[in-house]
Structure formats: structure tokens, C-alpha cells
Amino acid sequence: MSKRVAVVTGGIGGLGTAICKQLAGAGHTVIAADLPADDARRASFADATAGLDVHFMPLDVSDFSACGAFVRDVQDAHGGLDILVNNAGITRDSTLRKMDESQWEAVIDVNLGSVFNLSRHAIDGMQARGFGRVINISSVSGQTGNFGQTNYAAAKAGLHGFTMSLAREVAAKGITVNSVSPGYIETPMTRAMPEDVRSRTIASVPVGRIGAPEDIARAVAFLADDASGYIAGANLPVNGGLFMSF
Ligand code: NAP
């Protein structure tokens, strides 16, 4: 196995922490890029990743020029950027009739704009080195739509078009671009659901349980592996069978 340099955006969040741990456990150097966090949150992330080759770097993924400076810093410090996991995401839920422009723009900028912002700066270095893995974290909402999430579902569905198009552009250069679409995952958000809604939700999952962050992290690490070079432009749903298609 080659030791690679990986960037995980939203890297100190629920899924991001699990992805950082999984990639570092696979032997890679991992940079968790996230908004500046308070000391308590940084300490908790440091505890969760203790003993692993994981580093925190502050970044606002919706800022195109900041993403350029960030990619240059990573390349200068670590000699390259081989694996890019576009995981940062936010929700600003509302039915369309009540949604204001700021809710639309924030969700599109963070969930979709960020994927352009980082990929655009990272792809040349990957191409020059003849190896790259770009993994975009989408959502089941981007496949089925979801009540109150026109902004989020549009951004997450947009990721699939981006993924397939960039995959075609760079497949011959040793770079694969794929997406992972999580279903219901055990996070503070799903833990906050009223108990009856939560049990109904879990009952609707064919596998019969809510997903764990590690379920997503394993899928990401699989796609990031050197040996996964024949998987290009694919979407891997990790949702316990909630939504099936081919
Ligand atoms: P999370 O715990 O809220 O993590 C998201 C991380 O992204 C947070 O650390 C957040 O920082 C960070 N972030 C927000 N805006 C950012 C920005 N402008 N620049 C840099 N970082 C930013 O959420 P999660 O549940 O782990 O979700 C991770 C990804 O999975 C998201 O793309 C989400 O849409 C997707 N997903 C999650 C689920 C689920 O059930 N959890 C299901 C489907 C898809 P702050 O905390 O400071 O805002």
C-alpha cells in the first residue's frame, strides 16, 4: 500500500472524524479541513484521532481563493494532495414557499460550490503525479428528494453530475472521481429526532438499523484505495437498502 496524503473537508464533524480515522488507519497522512473550531471541539477531535497521522487546518470551503491557498499549503507541507474527500455540508431546511435567498445560497455554496473550489485547485497536482482520488459525499436526498430540502437535494444531486463529468475528464490520468450517498446515519442531527419519528425512520431501513459513521468511512476508504482504480464516475449508496436503483 502507498502512503498517500488525504484531505477531508468538514473533517472534524460527525462523518468527517470517522473518515479521518479510517484513512489514517489505512496508513495515510490526513488533513482535516474545517471551519475554525473552539478549543473544546479541537481537543475532542485531537482525542478522537490521538496517535494517528491526522492534522487540523482551518478552511472555509465556500471561499474559492482560500481553497487555492489551502491546496498550495498542503502540497508544500506534504509533497502533494492525493485523496480529496469533499465531505463538508450544511442544511438550511425549509419548504420552498418559505425559503429565502440566503438559505438557498448558503447550501449551494457549501455543499456544491466547495466541490468545485477544492477540486479545481487539487486536480492539476494529481494529474502531474499521475494519481488521484476525489470522493464526494452526497446524500440519499440527492437521489430521491426530501420534503423541505429543495436546496440541499439540488446541491447533492448536482454532485452526481459533477462527479461523472470530472471522472470522464481525468480517468485516463490515474484519477478516479466517485461519490458516496449516505442514508440515515447516527449523528447529533438524527439523535435529536423525536423518538416516534426516529423509530419509524429506522423501521423503514431494510437492514433494520440506523447507519454508523464508520459505515460511510469504510466506503470512502474503499474508493480511496490504490486498488480501486477501475471504479470511476460511480455513486456508492450506503443507506441500509433504503433506496435501491441501478
Ligand atoms: P456535521 O457533523 O455537521 O459535519 C459537517 C462539518 O462541515 C462540520 O464540522 C461543519 O462545521 C463543517 N462545515 C460547515 N460549513 C463549512 C465550511 N464553509 N467550510 C468548512 N467546513 C464547513 O455533519 P455530518 O453529519 O458529519 O455530515 C457530513 C456530510 O455527510 C455532509 O456533506 C452531509 O450533507 C452528508 N450527509 C450526512 C448524513 C447524516 O445522516 N449525517 C446523511 C447524508 C449525507 P461546523 O460544525 O462549524 O458548522
Image (cartoon, rainbow, N blue to C red):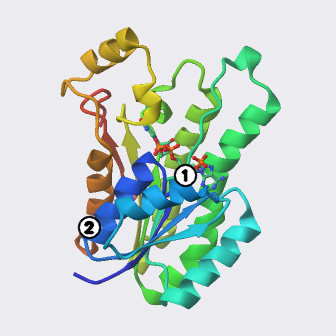
Q: Residue at x 28, y 67 (%)?
A: 230
Q: Residue at x 36, y 35 (%)?
A: 185
> SS class of the residue under badge 2?
helix
- Disc with the residue nearer the chain's start (2 vs 1): 1
Residue 224's place in the image compared with 178, above or below, is below
- Identify the image quadrant of the C terminus: top left
Crowding at mark 2 (Cα within 10 Å: few <14, some 14-19, many 20+): few
Report x, y in % for residue 97. 74, 15
Circle 2 residue: 228
Q: Specify the label residue 227 is tagged with.
A: none
Q: Nearer the viewer, residue 120 or 56?
A: 56
Q: Residue furthest top?
A: 196
Report x, y in % for residue 104. 73, 34
**Horizontal side of residue 106 vs 6, given as left or right:** right
- Tell me whether the residue at label 2 lies in contact with that at label 1, contact meaning CB atoms closer than 8 angstroms: no
Total of numbered circles in the picture?
2
Look at label 1 and name its amino acid. Answer: Ala
Q: Is residue 80 visible?
A: yes
Crowding at mark 1 (Cα within 10 Å: few <14, some 14-19, many 20+): many
Nearer the observer, disc 2 or disc 1?
1
Residue 127's place in the image compared with 67, above or below, is below
- Marks 2/1: CA–CA distance: 23 Å
Q: Quadrant of residue 243?
A: top left
On whether ligand 1 comes within 8 Å of the CB at mark 1, the answer is yes
Q: Nearer the viewer, residue 212 or 154?
A: 212
Q: Residue furthest left?
A: 207
Q: Residue at x 55, y 64 (%)?
A: 33
Q: Specify the label residue 88 is tagged with.
A: 1
Report x, y in % for residue 144. 45, 26
Residue 154's place in the image compared with 168, above or below, is above
**Horizontal side of residue 228 vs 80, given as left or right:** left
